[in-house]
Amino acid sequence: MTAAIASAPPAGLEAAFRAHERALFGLAYRMTGCAADADEIVQETFARALAAPPPRTDEPWSPWLTRVATNLALDLLRRRRRRGESASWLPSPLPTGASDAVLELPEPRERAPDARYERLESVTFAFLLALEALTPRQRAALVLCDVCGYSAREAADALGASEASVRVLHHRARRALAGYDGARCRPDAALTARTRAALEGLVQRLFARDALGLEALLREDVHTVTDAGGEFNALRGVRAGRVGVLRFHLRVAERRGRGARIAACVMNGLPALAITFANAGPRQAPRVLMRCEVDADGRIRAIHSVLATRKLQGVRFDA
């Protein structure tokens, strides 16, 4: 009987898991930019709650769970940095409909008045890539304060730090994101329409081998990134400049475009294309999620291609 009692889950843990699982996933995804990593963080958070629960299980679980998940995410970001950040790293794409878990977040007791990023904006590729310029603790401070709406005191509790240090981290994080703030990615109707038109034009011109049409669609300073996670053949680093980007994507379309199936979708707040190739040889990705960033005139300034299988788990491809 004693062993059965000792192995019993803490009071309220099952209810806490149901109530907070989606919000913790939303927090962990913004912290790491990877859905698979976020899933693992959520599972480990509740595993720790089972093994070593907080001393007062009769109190709300949210602050304790948020603190554990935040620090697990910090550990993961530090490990990722020690391994060396790849110039080809991209976030994992996720659907962002009203019912999708990625839009949920832990709720603070009182929303900070200067929180600046809406939930949908905070899962866009542009925002998540901008966060990569921050140190792990700066990223945590900014996500907690400017996305979740935590006060400095609540963020300090989550980070196990002083309010003063959190304010310094937050200030430095905002300063590092000044470039993003100068051209923020707000997924409104106008940006959605420009992005969809650019993607449609890009695919049409690629399949038609229309180099002149592509030149008109791409900005001179356009760049492209392919994230294969070391699993498939891909670009090494960033390919920048209109000529280089044009040649690369034309070459891929010529080699692999025949028979490819393309499905339009919305990922991370904006239109994207889920592409299934008809044939995949050794080290060739069978599927890719392609998306782009556009300027105010609808011209493409970045093309992102996610190939890594681990990062495509949230994408529904045309069967």
Image (spheres, helix red, strand yellow):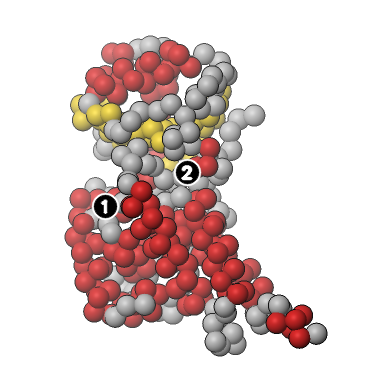
Q: Residue at x 42, y 68 (%)?
A: 71
The percent position of residue 31, horizontal first and vertical second, equals: 40, 58
In which quarter of the view is residue 261 placed?
top right
Mark sitting earlier along the chain (1/2): 2
Q: Amino acid at mark 2?
A: Pro
Question: On the rendered structure, is 319 left or right of 117?
Answer: right
- In the image, residue 203 sits, relative to residue 193, either above or below, namely above
Disc number for residue 93: 2
Q: Residue at x 43, y 17 (%)?
A: 253
The percent position of residue 212, horizontal first and vertical second, equals: 28, 13
Q: 317 or 279, which lies in front?
A: 279
- In the image, residue 56 sits, relative to residue 276, either above or below, namely below
- In the image, residue 262 sits, relative to residue 164, either above or below, namely above
For label 2, the SS is loop
Q: Label 1 crowding class (10 Å Cα cut-off): few <14, some 14-19, many 20+?
A: few
Image quarter in which the N terminus is found? bottom right
The percent position of residue 115, horizontal first and vertical second, equals: 32, 67
Dot in front, 1 or 2: 1
